[in-house]
Image: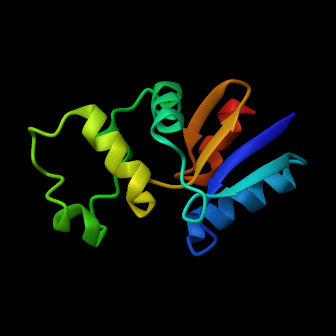
Amino acid sequence: MTVRIYHNHRCSKSRATLALLEAQGQVCEVINYLDTPPSSAELTQLLDMLGMTPRDLMRKGEPEYSELGLDDPSLDDTSLIAILASHPRLIERPIVVANGKAVIGRPPEAVLAIL
């Protein structure tokens, strides 16, 4: 089984999650989502797997969040997903996909539930 991780090598939680997966003997497909952002369709699928809304997946502390006025409640999910696809720094990380399920690796041990 291959585990997919949407990874940011600068993020300590992302690095710790990848290390945990590798320590568990998992073969990982590492997607540096800042270089290769998921499409809107991929994000929609990930959100379904995570059971989250686009707002749940957003990093509200990133400068882009306030610069783009993303606290505006009139923005619908389709708009927010498009924004996440075009501004991947706003995506919470890391996202791990395995066995048809997805989870955010915060804390890293959360990924063990889907292996």
- Quadrant including the N terminus: top right
Q: Nearer the viewer, residue 115 or 63?
A: 63
Task: Kindly tell me whether residue 56 is visible in this rendering.
Answer: no
Lateral position of residue 22 relative to residue 85, left or right: right
- The percent position of residue 62, horizontal first and vertical second, equals 31, 68
Task: Kindly tell me whether residue 11 is visible in this rendering.
Answer: yes
Residue at 70% from the left image edge and 39% from the top image edge:
112
- The percent position of residue 6, horizontal first and vertical second, equals 62, 52
Image position of 76 with respect to 33: above or below: above
Lateral position of residue 41 relative to residue 16, left or right: left
What residue occupies the far right of the structure in this picture?
Answer: 25
Residue at 64% from the left image edge and 71% from the top image edge:
9
Residue at 68% from the left image edge and 31% from the top image edge:
114
- The percent position of residue 90, horizontal first and vertical second, equals 38, 58
Lateral position of residue 8 relative to residue 78, left or right: right
Q: Nearer the viewer, residue 112 or 64?
A: 64
